[in-house]
């Protein structure tokens, strides 16, 4: 158990400070995965986005927590390649939930921005969050935005977005805020 906790802590820091492959000791906990592929153009250049979740939420199998849950996102074209790997450190209290319909791309200043929002299942209290992986102008971002959902099922942002999203370019920040305010209003929007 101690080595598992150490591995989870290690991979949390890896996700923040560099892209490394997942350690083989965690692979024994993989139960299934979800892979999404999308193609888009940035100007005249064709791009391919691949998003993969290891051990995603699965209501059909009644699996809402586990030993490990990981999301990776890769974007590539003929001139550029980048990726983000995030190993959620609290998989014992909830798994990553990715809705393919919420992944979007749009143009800002003649460049494509890719938003990959994901939530977490298994959290039964009023506090929850939405996380975003963002690719824009050869930069990548990972943000976690806190929400509070009341007993009536209505949810509101419980975060200072000017601080949380301070590293985003202003037009991109406005788009993310609009996304947050329109897609996540009710507790059902998180599952």
Image (spheres, rainbow, N blue to C red):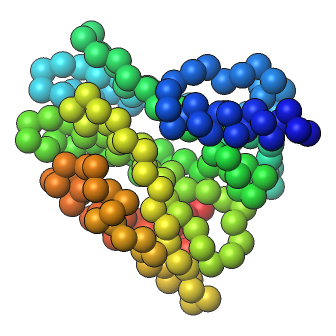
Q: Among all residues in the image, which is located at the extreme left?
A: 109
Residue depicted at 35% across the width and 18% down the height: 81
The image quadrant where one finds the N terminus is top right
Residue 68 drawn above or below residue 49:
below
Q: Give how far across and how far down residue 70 sits, in percent.
A: 63, 37
Residue 103 drawn above or below residue 162:
above
Residue depicted at 21% across the width and 27% down the height: 41
Observer-nearest of 161 and 147? 161
Q: Among all residues in the image, which is located at the extreme bottom?
A: 152
Query: Which quadrant of the figure has residue 104?
Result: top left
Left or right: 55 with respect to 183? right
Residue depicted at 70% across the width and 52% down the height: 90
Query: Which quadrant of the figure has residue 26?
Result: top right
Q: Give how far across and how far down residue 69 sits, in percent.
A: 68, 41
Residue 34 visible at all: no
Residue 136 drawn above or below residue 80:
below
- The total of numbered circles placed on residues is 0
Residue 191 visible at all: yes
Residue 86 drawn above or below residue 26:
below
Residue depicted at 18% across the width and 19% down the height: 45
Observer-nearest of 22 and 120? 22
The image quadrant where one finds the C terminus is bottom right
Q: Give how far across and how far down residue 96 sits, in percent.
A: 62, 49
């Amino acid at each position: 158990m101690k080595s598992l906790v150490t591995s989870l802590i290690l991979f949390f820091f890896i996700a923040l400070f560099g892209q490394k492959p997942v350690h083989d000791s965690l692979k024994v906990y993989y139960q299934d995965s979800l892979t999404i592929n999308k193609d888009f153009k940035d100007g005249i250049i064709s791009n391919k986005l691949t998003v993969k979740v290891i051990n995603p939420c699965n209501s059909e199998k009644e699996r809402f927590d586990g030993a490990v849950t990981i999301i990776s996102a890769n974007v590539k074209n003929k001139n550029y390649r980048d990726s983000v790997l995030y190993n959620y450190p609290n998989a014992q209290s909830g798994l990553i939930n990715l809705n393919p319909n919420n992944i979007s791309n749009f143009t800002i200043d003649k460049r494509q921005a890719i938003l990959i929002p994901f939530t977490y299942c298994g959290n039964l209290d009023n506090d929850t969050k939405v996380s975003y992986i963002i690719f824009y102008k050869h930069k990548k971002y990972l943000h976690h935005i806190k929400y509070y959902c009341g007993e009536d099922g209505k949810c509101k942002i419980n975060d200072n977005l000017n601080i949380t999203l301070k590293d985003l370019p202003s037009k991109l920040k406005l788009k993310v805020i609009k996304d947050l305010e329109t897609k996540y209003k009710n507790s059902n929007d998180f599952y």
